[in-house]
Amino acid sequence: MLRPKIELKSPEQIDEMRPANRLVAQCLVEVSKAVRPGVTTGELDAIVERMFEERNAKPLFKGYPGKVPFPAVTCISVNDEVVHGIPGSRPLKEGDIVTIDTGCNLNGWCGDSAITLPVGKIKPEVQRLVDVAWGTLDLAIELLNQRGRYRKWSQIAARMEKYVIDAGFSVVEQFVGHGIGRAMHEEPQVPNFKTRNWSKHDFWLDAGLVLAVEPMVNMGTKDVRVRNDHWTVETADGMPSTHVEHTLALTATGCEVLTDRTPLER
């Protein structure tokens, strides 16, 4: 089976991607300031929608096709929700964790990123889950900066999975990262785990590759299911889940985080 063609971006094209990714990062920084007990997920979504409107950026998620078109500019997932949670009237509570995932198209290029944040004080074991998710993403970035040693994505994915399993957690396998550029979802698919069919999914870590890397880490089982709203993905055992994501560009000198929002994850 021939693998789909991966489009490498020139340095000039990567430069053109920066405004969209910078805006996504700014939105996540701004919305994180509003995360507190009592705020609704719909109110958080409205913050991002307003920022996109002010910059004439096109939301990537709103209207995304499915059995029911996705109705919001962000996916907001709480506690046992893994990804694709629909914002609405639900208020956040002390001790929750909330994942906010969003993306936009600005000037013809896309940006995509996600954060998982605590709502007030959370249990130590849940904080550890959040820390491991960030650590998994940090590990991927670290290894992508060592492309003399790591030349294929399979090597990175195996290390990411081992990091999670060694911490006592599990990696979601039904959803993966993706290439990104003029479209939100481009080739290649980017698993965060060892897959049985690397002949189909593996790829070289060449300069010009732009990836949305997004580990999803569960406290319990890796198995997930989709709710009756046709979008919200939850853990099969009801235990907490985390999801973090950066858009990363591989350049001649290393790996650049286009959606850098330090110090949010520190």
Image (cartoon, grey):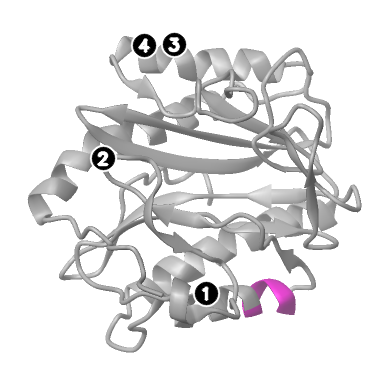
Which residue lies under the disc numbered 2? 182
CB atoms at circles 3 and 4 under 8 Å apart?
yes
Checking the image for residue 157, the label placed there is: 1
Mark 2 and mark 3 lie on one chain; the one further toward the N terminus is: 3
Give the residues drawn in magenta, as a range: 162-166
Distance between the Cα atoms at labels 3 and 4? 5 Å
Give the residue displayed 52% in from the left and 28% down from the top.
65
Asked if residue 65 is positioned above or below residue 141 in the image, the reply reads above
Task: Point out residue 120 in the picture as x, y percentages from the top left corner.
Answer: 76, 33
Label 2 element class: loop
At label 1, which amino acid type do we have?
Ala
Which residue lies under the disc numbered 4? 53
Mark 1 and mark 2 lie on one chain; the one further toward the N terminus is: 1
Q: Quadrant of residue 218?
A: bottom right
Asked if residue 23 is positioned above or below residue 164 in the image, the reply reads above
Residue lying furthest right = 237
Distance between the Cα atoms at labels 2 and 4? 19 Å
At label 4, which amino acid type do we have?
Glu
Label 1 element class: helix
Mark 1 and mark 3 lie on one chain; the one further toward the N terminus is: 3
Q: Quadrant of residue 223?
A: bottom right
Q: Is residue 8 left or right of residue 174?
A: left
At label 2, which amino acid type do we have?
Arg
Distance between the Cα atoms at labels 1 and 2? 25 Å
